Structure formats: structure tokens, C-alpha cells
Amino acid sequence: MLPAVASSEPNSALHSALRQFHAAADRIGLADQQRDILTAFKAIYQTRFPVEMDDGSFRVFDGYRVHHNAARGPLKGGIRYSPDVSLDDVKALAMWMTWKCAVVGLPFGGAKGGVVVDPRAISAYELENLTRRFTAEITPIIGPDKDIPAPDMGTNAQVMAWMMDTYSMGHGYTIPAVVTGKPVSLGGSEGRYEATGRGLLYLLEEHLQDAGGVRGKNIAVHGFGNVGGVAARLLQQAGARVQYLCDRDTGIFHPQGVDATAAFAFVESGRVLADWDGAGERIAPDAVLEADVDILVPAALENVITAANVDRVRAPLIIEGANGPIGPDADDALTARGVTIIPDVLANAGGVTVSYFEWVQARQYMHWREQQVNDELRRLLTDAYRAVVARAMQAQDCTLREASQWIGIERVIEATTLRGIFP
């Protein structure tokens, strides 16, 4: 493991994360030494490891696990399988996780991991081999009191089950709290799969309570995986009109609303929107970002709204289902136009919040019913949203993003100050 000094390439996710941090730090009046502490990374673990393939050959894969800040507790963050994984991206995601946990009030610090692989291009046997070998590689740095991985893009409950089993076999007994996002039958939490999408719904209902909630609102959802697909289905069930949705290859538009429930059930069965025969006009995926709707939900990747397309974004309200979907220049442009942005560190915190509930259940060997999970999720997210809005109103021209990071940074600084520096 090597210590890391935060640096970034222009237009990278880390560049966005650092720029957002310094904007909030400027409001706080954060001293240089405090900035140095919070922009440093506790540890970076990089590994190259072989995996046996179906034909008996071996391929070498690159993997990462980044620890950002552990002042508030054990580290928490997902594992991403994608051909686009980079160290800068993983560092940015780990930093965002630190603020996300802090702003919601969870006793965790931020971490993130990933493997450079397209999970769709390998078999189930190869995926299991890769997961077990990667878990073995990072076993020295993870654990229920140290670093608790969870699913992210390209990973799911089955991957978490393999990780938990591999880690447990190395210790001689079952340790369910080492990961979250597991199958319920292996100690996972009810409501975890839908948590991020459900959190988006709860926050939109809170934000729009004086405007009648989400009922009747026209919505565009960019990205149709676990976050976007669940959010689209729940928003439709709550009375919203999901006019636009898309996966990575296909966009769909219907003025009366796409049947998001049917579309997501189709995609969850292992198929893609291009093969779905539901009603709606087929459009380019990026056209969804430019939809003339009440609410835009970018729920796919980082930096999908940039200086190149921000002038064509028309929604007056954006809630970030993905991490870092709006680049810093685009963020400035949207703010100048009066667009309201509910930022990622608050908006998509539902997943890590229910992961926290799962970790608590595992540590106590208890099981909560889904209604209890959902009620606690709404309570924590609503409290966090109200605190962010109150903070934004205290300062002149303070956005919800700056207020969220302001609160998160303050809480991490408070923990750092109280703990002191050892030795």
C-alpha cells in the first residue's frame, strides 16, 4: 500500500471531486493544513492478478482499492467492474463516499474499489474466479471493522456472496458483515437492492412537497441499471410520468410516459432495451439528457453533462443518481441559469445508508423487515436534506452541492480534531 497525494487529470472524476471540495472549503475558510489532510488518501492498494479462464488459459487483470479518510469510522464503498475503471475515478469515488457518509450521519469513512474488466464479456465461471481472486488480494485491508465493500456498477448480490464466502473461508468461519449488498438469504438486508432508487424518490418527494410531490411531473432517466431502473419504476408508481429513459445503447421516448415497470422487468431478465417491444419512440441515449422535462435523473456514469452539451440541457431540476454525472464547468453553467441540482453525495446516499443498516443487522445477528428499513431510510435522508437546505439558506448564493460538502467536510474535520494526530 502506498500513500497518495491528490492530483488529477483535467476532466477526470477526481478533478471534479477536488474542485467541488475546494469550493466548499473556501466557504468554510478551511486552513491549508486541513485541506492537505482531507485531500490526501489514507491508502491506495493496486494489484495485478491472474485469473483462469474457461479454456484453461490465464488472463491478468488490474484491480484497485482506495481508502480516503477513516476519521469517522470503518471505510465503506463499492466495488466496480468496468473496462473504464481508472485509479483517478476510484480515488474520486472514495472521496465522494467520505462526504456522502458524513452528510447522512453514518459512522463510516470513504473507500472505493474496482477491477478493469467488462463483466458482460466473461462467463459466470470466469466472473466467480475473478471475484474470488480479487477478494483474496484485498483480504489484508478489508474486514467488518476496517473496510466493508458493497456492489457498484458491474457487480451485484452474487458477487458480494462470493466475496463474503472467500473472505470467510480464509478466516475459518462465516463473517457476513465483511460486505453489504449480499443476498437476503446470506444476511443481506431487505430493501437494499432498491435503496438508491428509493432514496431518489424520497428526496424528490421532500424537495417537491410544496409543489404536490412527484405526481404528474415529467421525468427523464438517463441510465437504466440498478439505480436508474429502480428509480424510474418507483417514480412511475408514485404518479410521475417517465417520458424518457435509456440504457447505454438505446433511448426511449413516449409523451404519455414509458412503461418503466415493464421495461425494467425486461432488462432485469438479462435483456436490453433495444429488444424491448414496448411502446415508445427509439432515440439516442444522450438525447435523454436534453429532454424538455420537469426533472432529469442522470443515473449512469460520471461526466455525462459537460461543457459540450450543457447548453442543451433543459430540465429545471436535476437529481444526481450517479456519482459525478455533471462536470465542474457544466455545474457552474447550470447554476448560473438557475437550475436546481440535488447533488450526488446526498441524492444517491440511499444505497450506503441501507448498507449501513445491513452492517448493523449483521453485527447484531438480527433481521429487519423491509418496512423498517424503508422508514429508517426516509428518516435519515429527510433529516440530511433538511440540514443541507438550512445550511444553503445561511450563506449567500450557496448551492445544495456546496452545502452538502460543507456539512460533510465539517463533520470529518470535527472527528479528525477530536481524535487528534497519532503519535
Image (cartoon, rainbow, N blue to C red):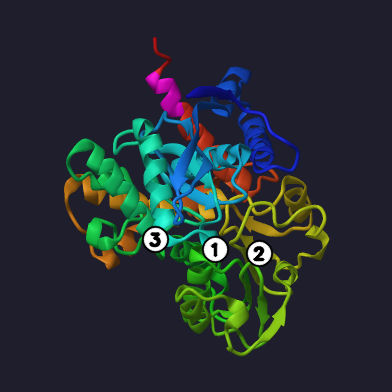
Residue 129 in the figure: left or right of residue 214: left
Q: Nearer the viewer, residue 36 or 394?
A: 36
Residue neighbourhood size for the residue with mark 1, other residues' Cα within 10 Å, grouped as few (<14), some (14–19), many (≥20): some
**Residue 16 showing in the rendered view:** yes
Label located before the other in sequence (2 or 3): 2
Q: Are marks 1 and 2 in contact (CB under 8 Å)?
A: yes
Question: Is residue 72 part of the magenta span, yes or no?
Answer: no
Give the SS element for disc 2: strand
Which residue carries the number 3 mark? 378
Q: Which residues are magenta?
A: 414-419
Task: Report the residue at 59% width, 82% height from top.
Answer: 275
Give the vertical position of 118 relative to 105 (above or below). below
Residue neighbourhood size for the residue with mark 2, other residues' Cα within 10 Å, grouped as few (<14), some (14–19), many (≥20): some
Q: Nearer the viewer, residue 25 or 173?
A: 173
Q: Which mark is residue 207?
A: 1
Q: Position of residue 212 (x, y in %)?
A: 54, 75
Give the vertical position of 234 relative to 27 (above or below). below
Task: Report the residue at 25% width, 37% height from top.
Answer: 170
Residue type highlighted by circle 2: Leu
Nearer mark to the viewer, of 3 and 1: 3
Which residue carries the number 2 mark? 317
Q: Position of residue 385 (x, y in %)?
A: 49, 53
Q: Position of residue 420 (x, y in %)?
A: 41, 17
Task: Report the residue at 44% width, 51% height from top.
Answer: 56
